[in-house]
Image: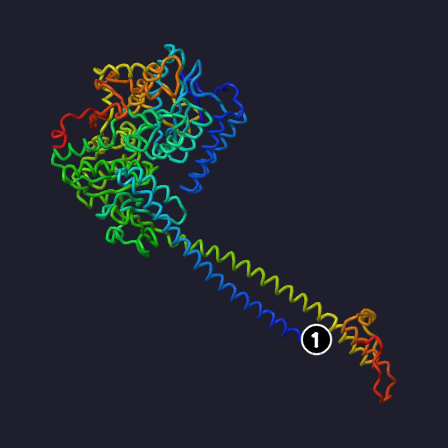
Amino acid sequence: MKIQKLFQRTRFGIFLLFGVIVLSTSALCIYTVDTQLTSEYETNSQNIAKSVADASVDILLNRNLATLQSMIDQFVEIQGIRYIYITSENGEYLAHTFVPGIPEQILASDHSNIEPVERSIPGLGDFLEVGSPILAGVAGTVHVGMDQDEVALKIQRAIGQQVILICIFLVVGVLASIWLVNLAAKPLAELLAYAVNIAGNKEPETSADDLLGRDDEVGDLARLFRHISDQPPGSGAPGTPPENVR
Amino acid sequence: MGVRDGNGQSGDKPGPPSPLLTRRTMLRRGLAGLLAVSCAGWAGRKDADAVLGGLNMVSAQETGSGTGFEGATDDEIVLGMSAAFSGPSRGLGSELYRGAMAYFNHVNDNGGVAGRKISLKLYDDGYQPDPCVRNTMKLMLEDNVFLLFGYVGTPTVTRVLPLLKKFQDEQVYLFFPFTGAQPQREPPYGDFAFNLRASYRQETAGLVTNFLAAGKKRIAVFYQADAYGRSGWAGVRAALDGHGERLAGEATYRRGQRFTGSMREQVEILKANAPDAVICIGSYAACAAFARDAIDRDLRVPIANLSFVGSENMLQLLSDLGEDVETYSRYLVNSQVVPSYEDTSIPAVREYRELMERYDPAVPDELVQESYSPFPQSFVSLEGFLDAKLMTEILRRLGGTPDRDGLEEAVFSVQDFDLGIGERVSFGPDRRQGLQTVYYTVVQEGRFVTLDDWQGWLS
């Protein structure tokens, strides 16, 4: 019906509005979650490296490497941490968690570096490595490798959950708006049919009581149409609106 | 799963009713709570779960479901044992247990210790640290064993030692663990364990010295990526340092490796370093796999293994290949911490062989998850036998009223004690390891025999 075409713009506007909201919210969410989680994982890795470094001092000084290994084995059980190795002040590898051996990329790296480094190790994956000095570096350095693929997967999951939630809101919002628009369009369509029938001096196809009994603008218009149609033909003078039309 | 076994019997036996909430149980609950909080912060959720399991045990005890006695009654002394009875290292726990039970059964059949039978409360940890920690909490808090005995492995024992320190007021000591690692021999945990066997440091030092003396200067290490492997690695490194040499190379494997797994990567890593000899610090399945792949990939150099490897289990796996066992075993040299069980000139070996034949102890069915064919004799079961023999002597020295308070004193009273293997055993505040001798064995005609002539064997 033509009257519903009036609402197509409204629907389009609603879709557009919701789309903009969803896209902007998703983009903000992706940025926030990605930034915060990446930062959190990096901070956690640095904290772990620092914890290992702090706890290693006495163990290293006592040359108890079995206990040192036992300690780092426990830290590797933490999600996201893929490897840990401890080098002496001379660059000797005192304990590590690599199997079947220490990768060449690690062997070739600066053992005393504590700045975050991104590493890509063939066969193992991509890692963000952070370091922490033991006893200000004079006793060695702890290096913790965080699996970037695993972290990326976790971030993607977190973002995916948020975007799914926003999309659900979008679908519910759009469906609700369509329902509401249809709610407004239906009486207008009835009013149009009523007006067409009056203009053609036909009997209304549906009962006009519902329309005439409404206390909203549609009811007012229906009553106004009825009033105009009830005026004697050729009276010429503008009629007075009926009392029940606001 | 826990099993009590004394005199070959198995199954739990109910103890006297549990006391109500006593000062001791309150202390335990408080300590367990503190441990839970500290461990949760230290090791993450996994350990926290284990510790919370311990808390539940305390609750169970308070509500009367625990055994509720102190490990020594008028009839019985209960020792707690957590070891590998399942998984690729199940042979070690099984053989150690069999050797110990052969002697304990003999003692029990002859009236026990001051009228008390010795029984073992057993748990399987599969040679994994977390189950071992849970088992130990159970043994200490729920089962209230008199002492801990015959634990198997470095990664397991290393994680249990902090528990012993945490509960040091309870004076639960760990006796004769099947590991030569340093943590239970040195501060801060050395005071909570007593060792019988020589250390890995002594074993690796002996191997390195003999290799170097024979001109094998490029020594590489193949080791388990955990505390055990690191302990042996550190021993080899220290021994080489002492001779002005450095490690020629190293390769690792993950704990739990089975014989069917490949060790080719490790072999290639070591081969690239052209070693003159390789010292393996691993379990028998992994070390057998390494020896197999080394020969298959033409790394034909002496391959040494430490006592923990379980020589017979290793040789059995290589024999099961169905090919010439001589090919795979001719390069093996294994260090041992007990003399050869083939040497019947040794009184303790004769006694061991006789009691093993008489009792032929079996691991309780409840603990058997995978089939295992025990050996009539083995180095591991002989060590378990000697552990049990010394343990019995210490319990005897406690007198008629066994009390944990007197345990340390009883151990320190062991001076120049003759275990029957030639080397005398002494303990003291600064001497918490009974034996110091390391033996070396090679394979001849399908069995391990004592190696006396290194030069001759290596030539």
> Could you say whether the residue bearing mark 1 is in a helix, strand or loop?
helix
Visual colour scheme: rainbow
Above or below — where is B310 with respect to B392? below
* Residue A4 vertical placement versus B264 (above, below): below
Residue reaching furthest front? Answer: B23
Instruction: Identify the amino acid type marked 1.
Output: Ile
Residue B333 position within the rendered picture, expressed as x and y whole percent measured from the top left:
20, 31
* Residue at 42% across, 18% down: B72
Q: Nearer the viewer, residue B418 or A22?
A: B418
- Identity of the residue drawn at 22% across and 42% down: B297
Residue B9 picture quarter: top left
**Circle 1 Cα neighbour tier, 10 Å, few/some/many (<14 / 14–19 / ≥20):** some
Label 1 chain ID:
A
Q: Is residue B81 above or below residue B42?
A: above
The image position of residue B328, as x and y in percent, is 23, 33
Q: Tell me if B165 is positioned left or right of A1 in this view.
A: left
Q: Quadrant of the C terminus of chain B?
A: top left
What percent of the width, then of the height, locates residue A80?
Answer: 39, 49
Which image quarter holds the N terminus of chain B?
A: top left
The residue positioned 64% from the left and 66% from the top of the image is A177
Residue sitting nearer the eye, B161 or A105 = B161
Total marks in image: 1
Q: Quick check: B114 above or below B93?
A: above
In the displayed structure image, the side of residue B37 where residue A61 appears, left or right: left
- Residue matched to label 1: A3
Q: Position of residue B171 (x, y in %)?
A: 38, 25
